[in-house]
Image: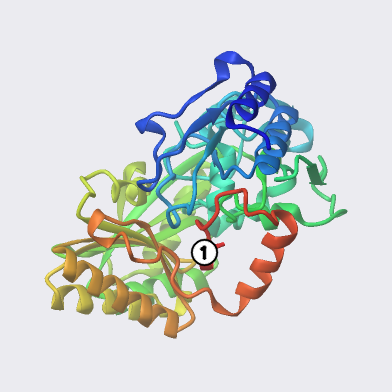
């Protein structure tokens, strides 16, 4: 039988003495305390660490910038944190081909700064770009308002490398935009919360930086009015990049639209918008309105539930009215930011029993209409609340994939949908 000291010595020999150490309270996640931390320097070391942990029966928690460790359910076990902090390089920026190859531990801001040197960008606006890593953004499928124009995060990926639990390095895709060969690992890995493998590198398609940008805002009398405005804009010939609706318990409902073009193009787009929305006062706004989703996390959230919602774009008004009615009935304060795609963020503040009742009621109502509510932050009084809600009919397929990729449940056991 292999002893704990032997396992630790083997892990230490893989990553080096200075990069393997005992976990501290700062490494805790979802109130579960891991025992050890390893910081591999490259994807070969990641694979070797996973192979060793898998053989020894250790539960592994992959970690990037640590910005979203509370997302998902608490892990059933947490023995070893595998950090991608040292996998932080931009490996290749093929600017002429509009592609980039980057390691998983590189932060989004670092990548964007590198790409901007050639007038390019990754069309992704995830939360906390200074600290959030590429691997973490993919694992949590975190994207913002640019999704409306440039597509979902998984649509920007053309290649990915995963370190599997058994130590295999698996790659899919390539370095050119038209590459469609191979098993579609990028779509499997995106949003899987690190339960299928540890992302080590990603190849993205890129877009040029805009010449100029302009943000305009306008108000709506109620949720139905906001719905009409959003649908009118979406059905028009306006070439907008982003469109969102935001509101709160004690405030009016506002909508924001982002245009990217030349100065002449921006003027033409603004003129068309003002003609389209004759009933509303359209005002120029600061770009700060696009941080509204991140702003939901700024105030203390020990007594707040923060969730990601997904509904059909045609039911945005119904959803906003539903949130208002359910929250007001329980005297729970609410704030929301909903994109024209039907994806949004919701913050609820209130007394714990009321908070629980509101979350459960809103979730049930959304799920009955084909939507979802994933709770990203749960205060201590809501620890028993499942983060994901109904797993739906896909749960059998998800479990089958987990069994094939990670049969010993080494990676993030219990954190994903249905306790996967």
Which residue is at the front of the view, 184 or 92? Answer: 184
Q: Residue at x 53, y 51 (%)?
A: 140
Q: Residue at x 47, y 55 (%)?
A: 242
| Relative height, residue 72 to residue 17 (above, below) | below
Q: In screen coordinates, is 329 left or right of 64?
A: left
Q: Is residue 232 left or right of residue 335?
A: right
Q: Is residue 414 left or right of residue 32?
A: right
Give the percent coordinates (x, y) of residue 389.
43, 71
The N terminus sits in image quarter: top right
Q: Is residue 339 visible?
A: no
Which sits in the foreground, 115 or 235? Answer: 115
Q: Is residue 115 above or below residue 128?
A: above
Identify which residue is drawn at 70% across, 45% down. Answer: 165
Name the residue furthest front.
1
Locate the C terminus by quadrant.
bottom right
Callout 1: SS: helix
Q: Residue at x 63, y 22 (%)?
A: 9
Q: How many marks?
A: 1
Residue 260 image offset from top left, x and y in percent:
51, 47
Q: Nearer the viewer, residue 209 or 75?
A: 75
Residue 348: x percent and y percent? 24, 62
Residue 207 visible: yes
Compared with 112, 241 (above or below) is: below
- In this picture the colour scheme is rainbow
Q: Which residue is mark 1?
A: 419
User: What residue occupies the far right of the structure in this picture?
Assistant: 181
Q: Residue furthest bottom?
A: 368
Picture coordinates of residue 121, whole percent (x, y):
60, 37
**Within 10 Å of the Cα at label 1, are there few (<14), some (14-19), or many (20+) other Cα atoms?**
some
């Amino acid at each position: 039988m292999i002893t704990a000291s032997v396992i630790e010595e083997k892990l230490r020999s893989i990553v080096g003495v200075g990069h393997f150490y005992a976990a501290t309270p700062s490494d805790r996640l979802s109130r579960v305390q891991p025992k050890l931390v390893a910081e591999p320097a490259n994807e070969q070391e990641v694979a070797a660490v996973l192979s060793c942990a898998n053989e020894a029966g250790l539960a592994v928690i992959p970690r990037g910038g640590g910005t979203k460790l509370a997302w998902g359910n608490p892990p059933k076990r947490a023995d070893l944190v595998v950090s991608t902090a040292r996998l932080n390089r931009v490996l290749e920026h093929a600017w002429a081909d509009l592609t980039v190859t980057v390691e998983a531990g590189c932060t989004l801001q670092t990548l964007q700064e590198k790409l901007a040197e050639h007038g390019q960008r990754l069309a992704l606006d995830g939360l906390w770009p200074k600290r959030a890593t590429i691997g973490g953004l993919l694992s949590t499928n975190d994207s913002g308002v640019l999704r409306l124009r440039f597509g979902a995060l998984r649509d920007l990926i053309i290649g990915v490398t995963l370190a599997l639990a058994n130590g295999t390095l698996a790659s899919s895709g390539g370095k050119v935009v038209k590459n469609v060969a191979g098993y579609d690992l990028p779509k499997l890995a995106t949003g899987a919360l690190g339960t299928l493998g540890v992302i080590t590198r990603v190849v993205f398609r890129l877009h040029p930086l805009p010449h100029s940008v302009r943000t305009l805002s306008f108000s709506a009398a109620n949720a139905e009015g906001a719905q009409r405005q959003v649908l009118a804009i979406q059905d028009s010939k306006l070439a907008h990049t982003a469109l969102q609706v935001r509101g709160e318990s004690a405030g009016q409902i506002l909508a924001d639209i982002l245009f990217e073009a030349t100065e002449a193009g921006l003027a033409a787009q603004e003129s068309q918008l003002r003609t389209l929305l004759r009933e509303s006062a359209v005002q120029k706004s600061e770009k700060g309105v696009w941080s509204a989703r991140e702003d939901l996390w700024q105030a203390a959230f020990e007594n707040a539930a923060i969730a990601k919602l997904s509904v059909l774009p045609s039911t945005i008004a119904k959803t906003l009215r539903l949130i208002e009615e359910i929250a007001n009935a329980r005297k729970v304060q609410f704030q929301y930011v909903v994109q024209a795609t039907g994806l949004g963020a919701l913050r609820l503040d209130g007394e714990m029993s009321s908070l629980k009742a509101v979350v459960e009621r809103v979730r049930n109502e959304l799920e009955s209409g084909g939507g979802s509510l994933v709770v990203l932050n749960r205060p201590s009084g809501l620890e028993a609340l499942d983060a994901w809600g109904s797993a739906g009919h896909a749960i059998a397929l998800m479990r089958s994939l987990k069994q094939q990729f990670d049969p010993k449940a080494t990676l993030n056991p219990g954190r994903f949908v249905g306790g996967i």
